[in-house]
Image (tube, rainbow, N blue to C red):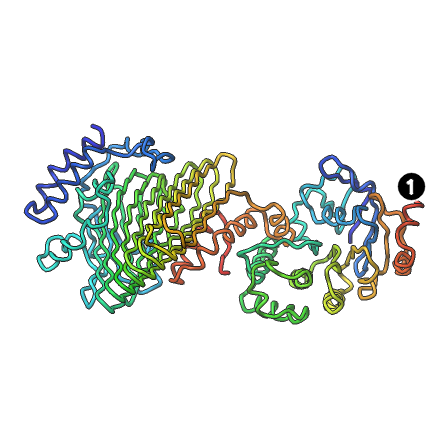
Amino acid sequence: MLKIEDLHASVEDKSILRGINLEVKAGEVHAIMGPNGSGKSTLASVIAGKEEYEVDQGDIILDDENINELEADERAHKGVFLSFQYPVEIPGVTVTNFMKTAINETRKAKGLEDMPAKDMLKLIREKSELLEIDRKFLSRSLNEGFSGGEKKRNEIFQMAMLEPKLAILDETDSGLDIDALRIVANGVNKLKNEDNATIVITHYQRLLDYIVPDYVHVLFNGRIVKSGGKELAQELEKKGYDWIKEENVD
Amino acid sequence: MKLKDKLLSSFLAFENQVDIDSYVHDIRSEAIKNFEIKGFPSKKDEAWKYTSLNKILKEDYSVFAKDAEALDYKEVKKYFVHDIDSYKIVFVDGKYSSQLSETTHDGIDVCLMSSVLNKPKYHLIIENYFNKLASKEDSLASLNTAFSREGAFIHIPKNKMAQKPIQIVHFSTGNEAALMLQPRNLIIADEHSHVQIIERHQSLTTHPVLTNSVTEIFAGKRAFVDYYKVQNDKENASLIDNTYIKQKGDSNVSLHTFSFGGKLIRNNLNYYQHGEHIDSTLKGVTIIGDKQHVDHNTLVHHIEPNCESHQDYKGIFSDGATGVFNGKVIVEKEAQKTNAFQANNNLLISDKATINTKPQLEIFADDVRCTHGCTIGQLDESALFYMRSRGIPEKEARALLMYAFANNVLESVRIPELKKNINKLIANKLGVNIGFDL
């Protein structure tokens, strides 16, 4: 589904990703771990199409199509979803209206009519129940005054609404208490199927107890320096990142 | 001939058409004298520093329009809030259109200024209210007074409620190569009465039109006046709106101005509070582009204690558009416990767009709460990326952000159909086809 080949990316002439190779197949869950500043969030943003990041070299291929040149919204239409580490507050736009617009614009891009209001309401009800989201919450301004946990739950709610092919969860566990973590992880697990894939970006192993990865990759200094099964996450939890750093002194 | 000279000589012809024995005659004569002395304002006047009328004054406007052909309602329906039951006072090239109007004298008066000026039974009302608020110093208000003959007259007697909103619409047909209009409105809401009004000026062609309008509003004790001005005119239409509001105790007057189109718009909005526990609301949304110019010049005069005023103006300027906000709040020494709020927030979408914003607070009382704030900013790039990552294209994401920026002004629109209408105008203006039904 997703193939990243020798990806180099920079922001304001500062090189951050230095040759990433990664293949994610449908039905798989990949975890990307690594110390702070290793380039995890950059990788997420580059896949999602953030303009500030310059791709200097390499390819991002989604379903055999190179998406390097596509705008963020065009990537979203093709099924890429990024759950933000820091979701942006947008006063004046309610959660419901935001989702309506997002869904209908995606449909428009596919040549489909707007979703009938009735179906939209039903979908919203279904998905908000999945994430145990209070209905009142949906008429509030997007992320404005939300607690850290509410923001993250709202991200996964949006993911549930949009049903992406490739979901990238950027530090979704940060700021979550254990109950919220369970709800979020449960939501992600229920949305998982044979046709979609998930990339979980996390600093800690905690989230991976709930969303069990098929593969774990360690990112350091803009490169994937180690890959393995889920036991690699446990090893990192026990030993920390220092041994990775020592093994990879430039 | 220069426009000023043309107007002065036209006044003599105008005098021949109206009743020169009337009470109003002297007022008109005095007004034209004032206009003759002062002339049109220029950038040298402090209040006109950022707005030049030069460009629009050089047109050769007709002062008296020929009779236009009747308009077909179907063709102009879109300029009304047409999905509600309403009274309508409609003018075509400055003349009353009975066919498009729906007036009443049943318990309330919703009718024409011309008939009120001429009928003896309204004599006292004219003596008590006409030209009592409009500034006698201001040359443009004087010019309007000199040529005052037609406009809307609304009188809601004590304890009465206008059961449906009143729409005042001025059309110009393009029958003249260029046309100047001087509508004059008088609105009296007596004690404990209630009225909602929507006003619109609409040119139907690209011929130049200059409207110099004066509206005087009197709100009695505990009266409630809810007023909306929709300014979405064609590219060669300009509007100078002079509105004066006098409020008595416990009254509530709210005025929203939506400025989306026209060549040049100047809103002179003046509130005078005469009584305690008065609530005055002034709100506006301006969304303009090209070389459009919108100037909000407001005054709230707090004269007595325990009153409130709320000003909230939002502006979004793209291309080479320019905006001006000049908000003056005066709190007299006696006006203790005043609570005055003023905000003017602006988004500049292009490098060439300009906003001049100037709050002016003159506070002579010592126990008051006055807050004001002006901001000028750009669209939040991180919010744009967030929205685009959810599949909302750039243009739509920008539009949604701009709408959200203006949203708290739109939220206070009390006529839902009007709000829908405004939402559509905004979507059109921003070039997107999304429903902003928040």
Q: Is residue B22 left or right of A19 when viewed as pictured? A: left
Q: Is residue B96 left or right of B366 when viewed as pictured? A: left
Q: Which residue is mark 1?
A: A249
Q: Quadrant of residue B416?
A: bottom left
Q: Quadrant of residue A120?
A: bottom right
Q: Chain of mark 1?
A: A
Q: Is residue A156 left or right of B392 when viewed as pictured? A: right
Is residue B54 or residue B194 the one in the foreground? B194
Q: Is there any visible trace of residue B108 in the rendered image?
A: yes
Residue B21, image x, y percentages: 5, 47
Give me the residue at 81% from left, 46% from top: A38
Asked which secondary structure carries label 1, the reply is: loop
Is residue B215 or residue A74 the one in the foreground? B215
Give me the residue at 35% from left, 46% from top: B298
Residue B421, image x, y percentages: 40, 56
Q: Is residue B344 above or below residue B163?
A: above
Residue A40, image x, y percentages: 78, 49
Q: Which quadrant would the N terminus of chain B be assigned to in this image?
A: top left
Three-letter amino acid code at the position of disc 1: Val
Is residue B327 or residue B369 the one in the foreground? B369
- Count up the numbered dots: 1
Furthest-left residue in this view: B21
Q: Is residue B123 above or below residue A126?
A: above
Q: Is residue B288 above or below residue B221?
A: above
Q: Is there any visible trace of residue A81 in the rendered image?
A: no
Residue B429, image x, y percentages: 45, 47
